[in-house]
Image: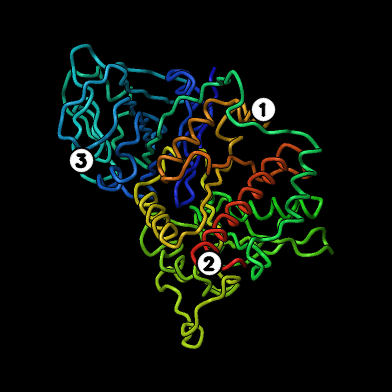
Amino acid sequence: MQKAKVRKISTETLTSNLPEERGEQLCAILDNVELTLLYKASVHGYKASAFHKRCDRQGPTLLVAYNNSGYIFGGYTSVDYARSGREITDEEAFLFSFKSGTSSYIKINSGYNARYDDANGPNFGQQLYFCHNNQPVVYHQGGHAFSINTSSMYGNDTQLNECEVYKVEQEPEVSVEEKPWRNVLWTPERRAELIGLIQNHKPLMTSVSQVRILMIGPVGAGKSSFFNSINSIFTGHVTTKAMSGSAGTSLTVQFRTYPVNDGREGKLLPFVLCDTMGLEEQSGAGLDIEDISSILQGHVPDHYKFNPMAPFQPDEQKASRPASLQEKIHCVVYVIDATKISIMPDKLQEKLASIHRKVNSLGIAQIVLMTKVDEACPLVEENLQSLYVSSYIKSKVQEVSSRLGVPVSCVLPVKNYSQELELELNCDVLLLTALQQMLRFADDYFDDIRSVEGNPK
């Protein structure tokens, strides 16, 4: 039987109420799927507008309702919610019910529409209405699309104590390319070579001693974890200097600049990783785009505490003089979770596009760091060296390239250290390769400045 894979995704921390055994049964019916929790009425509210905000245009979905009589029941539709005002034909739609040790499934009757796609709460067959009239109730009216017995389906207990909607995705096919779509040497010698190149790197501009790399991305994507991972490699063991985790809101609340030493007592390496508050889809939450502009131009000091309601204001003395090139950002890195690319909210994508345009206008180098590749693909989870023969990871790289408007060659998949206690060769090779590319891109930015200014230094 297919085991249910239920992930939490949102700007809030969402916890699924679906028991593992019931999830496994539903996944067995749906055949090799992942369930991603999109909407939870106790968190987002029972209003139809809240449901549609979270669930529209998400592809196939599974609605799971709960009542005080112990019934777990709901329905599946393979067609997007879109508030189209149309009758929806969906031969794959079905209803289900669980109670104690019993379970039942009700398929759509032939020749009937599966639901009406309007701006109200979810319905099945225009017979069974969930969150009816924006209330925690299920409402049944006569019809023939589904053969419903309300007594056996939900014990005639119409009061809901929870309603959840899950995005249903086929697990990625474990397909392998005939040859790697990128060439990587997974050897200790390559690791040592990359470390040497980074240790000895000298920025093209002699006025800059350290390349400043700004990490930008949604909450929980892995910005702080990337710094911790790079710091771990050069320290010689896994470290957690920067706060990282999977909280619903950003753990980083200050602008932090993290230099890295070559060993615990070694010299400073030629780069600084700058960490920011996570981006969030709502306005007035997460990192403000105006703050990013100030960071890019070198005005925001280390340890500055972000205030989403009020962007950074430099003091008059600093505002009157432009920041030096050494203080500005030389490379911007967008950190994106590979498991969430397909369900990135529109507003978050709009924020990233706005930042992308601003960075473009300043001519600053840009790279995308695609994290959690092991969680996204079973093949990679089993063996990280399979990364560049995985068709699924290749498709995710192409998708993030299209969504963010950056070339495919600028999308770098990595796995940060998270649960590991010891360093691992394959992780190190990917992380060091990404860092080396950031330094190269920063040099391209410096080269552009030199050509514009006609300044050989």
Q: Is residue 251 visible?
A: no
Q: CA distance from mark 3 to mark 2?
A: 62 Å
The residue that appears at 56% across and 75% down in the rendered structure is 324
Q: Nearer the viewer, mark 3 or mark 1?
A: 1
Viewer-proximal residue among 135 and 164: 164
| Residue 310, percent from left and from top | 41, 74
Mark 1 Cα shell of 10 Å, populated few (<14), some (14-19), many (≥20): few
| Residue 198, percent from left and from top | 73, 53
Pointers 3 and 1 in contact (C-beta within 8 Å): no
* 3 or 2: tag closer to the N-terminus: 3
Q: Quadrant of the N terminus?
A: top right
* 2 or 1: tag closer to the N-terminus: 1
Q: Which residue is mark 2?
A: 454
Q: Which residue is mark 3?
A: 120
Pointers 2 and 1 in contact (C-beta within 8 Å): no
Question: Which element type, helix, strand or loop, lies under badge 2?
Answer: loop
Q: Where 375 falls versus 435 (above or below)?
A: above
Q: Which residue is mark 1?
A: 382
The residue that appears at 67% across and 45% down in the rendered structure is 431
Q: Quadrant of residue 385?
A: top right
Identify residue type, mark 3.
Asn
Q: Quadrant of the C terminus?
A: bottom right
Mark 3 Cα shell of 10 Å, populated few (<14), some (14-19), many (≥20): some
Viewer-proximal residue among 131 and 401: 401
Q: Quadrant of residue 443?
A: bottom right
Q: Nearer the viewer, mark 2 or mark 1?
A: 2
